[in-house]
Image (cartoon, helix red, strand yellow):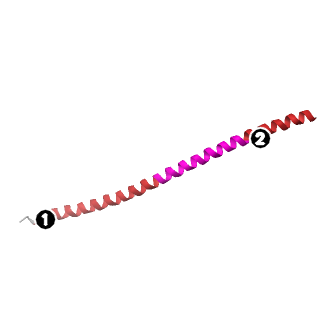
Amino acid sequence: MTPPEERDVALELERLRGTVEAGFARLDGRLDLALQRTEQTEGELARLGERVAALEQRVWAASGAATALGAAIGYALQIIT
């Protein structure tokens, strides 16, 4: 039979093992959640990037059209006056 001190040490080591395993399980769950949130954020950023690119194209097209229209009106006013 093992001496009482060895049994106490073995019991405490087993409790410590359980505590460590539970802590790792909690950390694993938190890491999974953080990874899921990161993936969602990356997806949202990609979609927002696409929207910004589309808006930039529209703005450049509209500003080009406005410039051409302004030049045409300016030219027409010079001819009329």
- Residue at the right extreme of this rendering: 81
The residue labelled by disc 1 is 7
Tell me the crowding category of disc 2: few under 14, some 14 to 19, or many 20 or more residues within 10 angstroms, Cα based: few
Q: Which quadrant: the C terminus?
A: top right
The residue labelled by disc 2 is 66
Tell me the crowding category of disc 1: few under 14, some 14 to 19, or many 20 or more residues within 10 angstroms, Cα based: few
Q: Position of residue 53 (x, y in %)?
A: 61, 44
| x 83%, y 36%: residue | 72
Q: Say above or below: 31 vs 50.
A: below
Q: Quick check: 37 left or right of 63?
A: left
Q: CA distance from mark 2 to mark 1?
A: 87 Å
Q: Earlier in the sequence, mark 2 or mark 1?
A: 1
Q: Quick check: 16 left or right of 31?
A: left
Q: Position of residue 11 (x, y in %)?
A: 17, 65
Q: Position of residue 32 (x, y in %)?
A: 39, 56
State the image quarter where residue 3 is shown.
bottom left
Secondary structure at badge 1 equals helix
- Residue at the left extreme of this rendering: 1
Residues in magenta, as a range? 39-62
Q: Position of residue 62 (x, y in %)?
A: 72, 43
Q: Quick check: 5 left or right of 75?
A: left
| x 86%, y 34%: residue | 75
Q: Nearer the viewer, mark 2 or mark 1?
A: 2
Residue 33 is marked as: none
Q: Say above or below: 68 vs 34.
A: above
Residue type highlighted by circle 1: Arg
Magenta segment includes 54: yes
